[in-house]
Amino acid sequence: MSGLQKTLAPCEYKTGKILGQGSYAVVKEAIHVKTGKTYAVKVINKKLMRGKEFMILNEIEILKRVSKGHPNITTLYDYFETPNNLYLVMDLCTGGELFDRIYNRGHYYEADAADIVRTVCSAVAYLHDKNIVHRDIKAENMLFKSKEENAPLLIADFGLSKIIDNQINVLMTTCGTPGYMAPEVIARTGHGKPVDMWSIGVLTYFLLCGYTPFDGSRMDEEVKNILAGNYKFEPVQYWFAVSETARDFIRKLLVVNPNLRMTAKQALQHPWLQPSEINARSVEAPQNLMPIIKNNFDAKRKWKKAMESVLFTQRMKIAAATNEAMKAAADEEVNGSVVVGSAVVRDEEGIDSSDNIEKLEKYNSTDFNQFDFDGKVKETKEEVKATDVAAAVAAAIDENSKTTVKKD
């Protein structure tokens, strides 16, 4: 890239308030100057991501493949960079997270849960048809487009997603959100599309009672339960209003052997997801699940799970990860000119921090986890090391070493 020249173009967006913040990026509200349309812009700090550019390229490539292809998957509208940051322009979802929306409703029935799961299965079936594994299906990654009652539910956050094809058909990285992770992910025996279906099973269980199936007082207990597929529809008072058809749906997803799990298309054909069959219940009349959901939903538990998720999925050994650098990313306003195309920009240390987007045209998506910042092929496992639960996994496996893991 040394022979390329810097290219500048007028910025088309004005950023506003911060909507969220992670370890290497912030999400800000933005407005398109000419049209007045509002978007969510993911602002990624280049300095914090140095050496991990393949992660962003992978996310962009996946979003390009699926954008506008399914009504329940977030859309990537644009992407560009400045000398300090990379910007991804996506849907602005003002309707809130899935569970928050449910929690604020006055009533909530099993049929409502089935509608949500049907939507998720449809979107995941589309992803799997495109050979994409999301790897982080959970309620927190599902957002409503607006506050309107019939607003579409969108699956978001493709930061851990991967493309599987002839070159990469088995993934090995332990990643995701602990309570939603499939056994094969924790055991690192190789995983693929079935991990999303396990997560949908966990999500379905959660939507029907307000807690996840493998909860333990300690993380090693939770890991042990996941590896063994150890869960129950208990306490009985929380499940008496849930149909046997719904339970059967969950049982066919929370199967330790990934080869025996329902696929997304099979799940869509299950009786529980058929609108005409939803009233075929084991109880006489639909019961409002909201009192049970609210009783079981503990704000402190949610905060704890969220913190574990951040530590688990986003702890990366980045020497440049400082509070000052993060603040610079959050404070930078997009105005004047932005760097686009194949521009070369060097920071104060003389390091090339220019546009890598052009490599999308040079490399196949399967190459993204194999090149470093200079474009050289390197040997690597994948992006995220699950160091935060290593001890828990080791403890659980050690405890199970004298027994046979349940194979459904």
Image: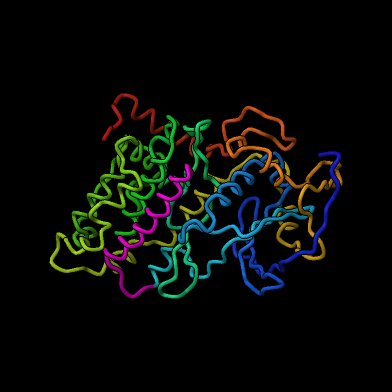
Q: Is residue 281 visible?
A: yes
Image location (x, y in percent) of residue 133: 47, 43
Which residue is at a point 35% across and 57% down the rendered structure image? 117
Q: Which residues are magenta?
A: 105-132
As drawn, the residue found furthest toward the top would be: 402
Image location (x, y in percent) of residue 119: 38, 59
Image location (x, y in percent) of residue 362: 68, 39
Quarter of the view holding residue 352 = top right
Q: How is the image coloured?
A: rainbow
Quarter of the view holding residue 384 = top right
Image location (x, y in percent) of residue 284: 13, 66
Q: Quadrant of the N terminus?
A: top right
Q: Which of 365 and 308 lies nearest the eye of the viewer?
A: 365
Would you say 138 lies left or right of 257 here? right
Q: Is residue 234 visible?
A: no
Q: Which of 215 and 32 lies nearest the eye of the viewer?
A: 32
Relative to 276, is 194 above or below? above
Q: How many marks?
A: 0
Q: Is residue 126 magenta?
A: yes
Relative to 204, is 3 above or below? above
Relative to 230, is 298 above or below? below
Q: Quadrant of the C terminus?
A: top left
